[in-house]
Amino acid sequence: MSEQAGAVNDATSTVPATQGQTKGGGSSATRVAVVTGAGSGIGRAVALALFAEGYAVVLAGRRADALEETRRQANDSENRMLAVPTDVSDEAAVGALFDAVRTHYGRIDLLFNNAGRGAPAVPIDELPVQTWRDVVDVNLTGMFLCAQSAFRMMKHQEPRGGRIINNGSISAHAPRPRSIAYTATKHAVTGLTKSISLDGRADNIACGQIDIGNAATEMTDRMVAGVLQANLVVAAEPRMDVQDVARAVVHMAALPLSANVQFMTVMATAMPFVGRG
């Protein structure tokens, strides 16, 4: 699942450039959020939840039609959503995304750094190197590029500061069998989160991470039929409502910049994570 670069969607280019030029943090009337991977699943649910909380939301993702579907579901009569098809692994495309944020809104208060992809479940010796690179390009380099651009805007805007929330995974703690590329990148996201959190202190930039287990989206449909467990037995796993993830992100985002949820784990209660197995 690679990202596809694109230009700003003409249908959303009517958002006034002054909208969103308001105080950063948790309490301004119009805060500006960027959500990557906003065309489906967790990204769409979070984008809609932030929109409902009054944010102007910039939707980034690989498919323009999927981003437009997110806008349709939001009933965006106020033009508070901007769709920017973006390849997060492409430095120029990410630059164009944040140029669009700057042009339309003048600032950014929140980045939900969510775009990611998986890989076929194969043993390490059967994983093509190109597949490894593709996963790293999206899950790690893409997340870095978006965080870097958001950090740069937050550092130099007025008022200064903002919040970055990285989507880790239960895989940032413990792997599934035959998931070395995905697991390695999600472990790396934890290091990215810690470094951004530390480096952002001087500029009022908070950074936290949400680690999600088995949210009910298309990506986890296979859990219902059964997936390979650590003991190499195939078993079905419970899932949770994706709206529970969206509510968790909204909670993290609503804190003042003087407070931060450094790490949050939200998961289906009975999934096989805590304990042996």
Image (spheres, rainbow, N blue to C red):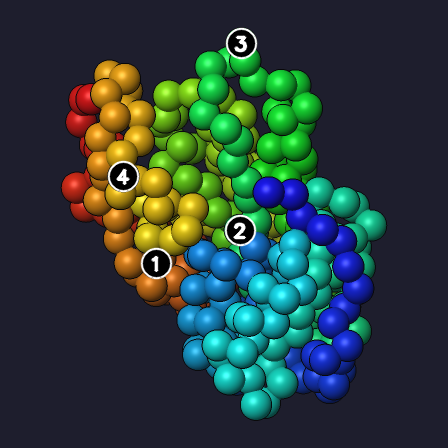
Left or right: 231 in relation to 25: left
Tag 2 near tag 4, CB within 8 Å: no
As helix, strand or loop, the secondary structure at mark 3 comes to helix
CA gap between label 4 and label 3 equals 26 Å
Q: Secondary structure at mark 1?
A: helix
**In which quadrant of the rendered image does the C terminus lie?**
top left
Tell me which residue sits at (26%, 53%) in the image. 240
Q: How many marks?
A: 4
Q: Does the CB distance between marks 4 and 3 fall below 8 Å? A: no
Q: Which residue is mark 4?
A: 225
Near-viewer residue (239 or 196): 239
Residue occupied by mark 2: 114
Element at label 4: helix
Residue type at numbered disc 3: Asp
Residue for badge 1 = 242
Which residue is the site of mark 3?
A: 125
Q: Earlier in the sequence, mark 4 or mark 3?
A: 3
